[in-house]
Amino acid sequence: MKKLLLLAPCILLSEAYAQQNISSTDQTFHVEKMNIIKTNVTGYAFRNINLSYERSINRWFAVNIGFGTVAEGKVPFMNAFLNEEDERRFQNLRIKATNFTIEPRFYIGEGYGKGFYFAPYYRYSKVSSNTFDFTYDYTALNTTIPIPLKGNGDANGNSGGLMIGAQFFLNKQHSFVLDFWIAGAHYGSGKGDFNLTGNVILTPEMQAQLKKEIENLDIPFVDYTVETNSNGAKIKVDGPWAGFRSGFSLGYRF
């Protein structure tokens, strides 16, 4: 009986110590990982090399910052807004682009980077071209003379938009994530300058024809004005700047 009385405090202390360890383990297990590094794998199909960082501020709010650069290449879907003849004029046109995005996220699901979210965002974008060839046909006295010109330039835009998406954890440790950009769209304003120059001195009549040809390109969603001179033309872009976002990102949470 004395032995049992002596053992009882030891048993109680052991049980209390075990419960403390379990409680401590549970608390450690539930410490949330607040950082995610991601890349939008869909963007690589469009030469878009990108990286983003998301930081959870609390359960329902996070901030995502992203940077992307599009390697120089052909203008995607150019045949969607230029007819076949005009598209041939820009055969060797190449563009490259960069963008920077700040995106506060409001989670309405489980939180801490998981579940559905809506995200108002700001985006800065810049697009620049290579030195490309542009030929226009000058017609006089029933004779057509091709006038070769060289063009280049750049434009940048500031826009705001809204993204709706959902983010999921891919393993039990909640270390790997899938971020599904369901749909996002932004709208703002942009400015830029593009120049066309050649070795032929253009007469006022030649300048008038060149101005008319450039204006007749009628590129959608782009407001631009054309000024001509004896060396070529200057195209000023000043108007709406819009875009659409969708895709899948894979990331690591820590």
Image (cartoon, helix red, strand yellow):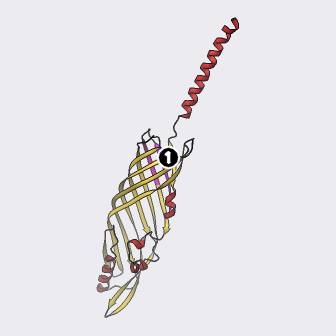
Secondary structure mostly seen in magenta is strand
Q: Which residue lies furthest to the front in this view?
A: 1
> In this figure, what is the number of numbered marks?
1
Asked if the magenta segment contains residue 105, the reply would be no
Q: Quadrant of residue 215?
A: bottom left
Q: In which quarter of the image is the C terminus?
A: top right
The residue positioned 41% from the left and 62% from the top of the image is: 126
Which of the two residues, 163 or 129, is positioned nearer the viewer here? 163
Q: Where is residue 209 in the image (x, y as percent from the top left)?
A: 31, 83
Residue 222 is left or right of residue 95, and the answer is left
Give the percent coordinates (x, y) of residue 179: 48, 50
Residue at the (41%, 50%) spot, across then down? 103
- Mark 1: secondary structure: strand
Judging by the rendered image, the residue that carries numbered circle 1 is: 168
Compared to residue 154, the image places residue 10 above or below, namely above
Q: Which amino acid does label 1 sit on?
A: Phe
Viewer-nearest residue: 70 or 173: 173
Instruction: Please tell me how crowded label 1 is: few (under 14), some (14-19), or many (20+) other residues with Cα within 10 Å.
Output: some
Is 52 magenta? The answer is yes
> x, y (%) of residue 173?
57, 41
Chain part drawn in magenta: 48-66
Residue in view at x 45 percent, y 76 percent: 132
Drawn side of residue 75 relative to residue 226, left or right: right
The answer to which quarter of the image holds residue 124 is bottom left
- Of all residues shown, which one is farthest toward the right? 3
Residue displayed at 32% across by 93% down: 142
Q: Image height check: is 177 above or below 125?
A: above
Position of residue 65 measured from the top left corner of the image (x, y, whole percent): 45, 50
Relative height, residue 80 to residue 104 (above, below): below
Residue placed furthest toward the top: 2
Q: In which quarter of the image is the N terminus?
A: top right
